[in-house]
Structures are given as structure tokens and as C-alpha cells.
Amino acid sequence: MTATTQAIELAVAAAEAAGDKLAQDIVAIDVSDHLVITDIFVICSGNSERQVKAIVDSIEERLHGLGVKRIRREGHAEGRWVLLDFGDIVVHAQLAEERVFYDLERLWGDCPMVELPAEVNAHAAVSQEA
């Protein structure tokens, strides 16, 4: 089984919204072969709790605009690791150090990556060049 077209479209929209708030290392992982509760994990990181919260707010706003309702949100008060469950996708927005510690990409390393548009992480390439 692979992620549905709808899940891929939502993952791209969430990734773009995260990129708008300068989230770093935005990736999408197709977990549909291993989980029945969701198709894709979108993972991104921010440099501060304030940035993580801004990333989350941007994602929620974008997906709400697409008519997608959030099922659950966890960790928003702390802003260190916020989980957003939209059914077809689950977003993990983490502080950079939390992301390194929990290393979700390694845990789900046997799952295929979902290709995201290059623009999603374009700001990171620009800041590395400067």
C-alpha cells in the first residue's frame, strides 16, 4: 500500500506552510505500509519554541483553508514537539535538539520518502549560502 493522492497533496501543503515560516529540514515519510491510522508523517524543525508554534499555526491555517479539520493537537503549550493529526497526515514540528534526540527519520528509515517540491526547503539553501 502507498499513501493516497490526497495524503500526498496535504503533506505538500503542510510542508509549504512550514517552509513559509522558515522551518528546517522538512521531510515527508510514507508510513502507510506500517500504520493504519495515517499515511504520511511530515517532520520539520524550528530553532525556538516561538518558531515551532508559528510553524504549527501556519500549517493549521493552510490545511483549514483546504477544508481539512485537525483531529488532534498535542504539545502546543510547550512548543518543543507539536504533533498535529489530520487523519491522512500527521505533522511533527520539533525544536532542532528534540528532533536530533528522537530521530524519527531513523525510526521510520525503512519507509519511503515522499518527494516534496524543492521550494519547500529553498530558504535553508539560501541561508547556508550566506
Image: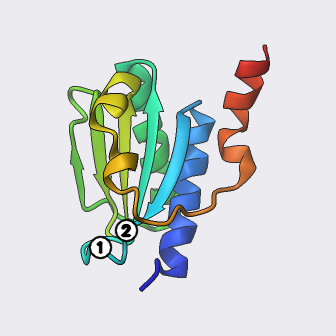
Q: How many marks?
A: 2
The amino acid type found where label 2 is placed reads Val
Left or right position of 73 against 86: left
| Nearer to me, 5 or 112 | 112
Q: Residues within 10 Å of mark 2 (few under 14, many from 20)?
A: many
- Asked whether the beta carbons under mark 2 and mark 1 sit within 8 Å of each other, the answer is yes
Q: Position of residue 123 (x, y in %)?
A: 70, 31
Q: Which mark is residue 9?
A: none
The amino acid on which the numbered mark 1 sits, given as a three-letter code, is: His
Label 1 crowd (10 A; few <14 / some 14-19 / many >=20): few
Q: Is residue 99 above or below residue 14?
A: above
Closest to the observer: 25 or 110? 110
Identify the residue position indicated by label 2 in the image.
31
Q: Position of residue 91 (x, y in %)?
A: 38, 51
What residue is rendered at 64% in x and 57% in y?
A: 116
Q: Which mark is residue 34?
A: 1
Residue located 25% across and 62% down the image: 71
Q: Alpha carbon of mark 2 to alpha carbon of mark 1: how far?
A: 5 Å
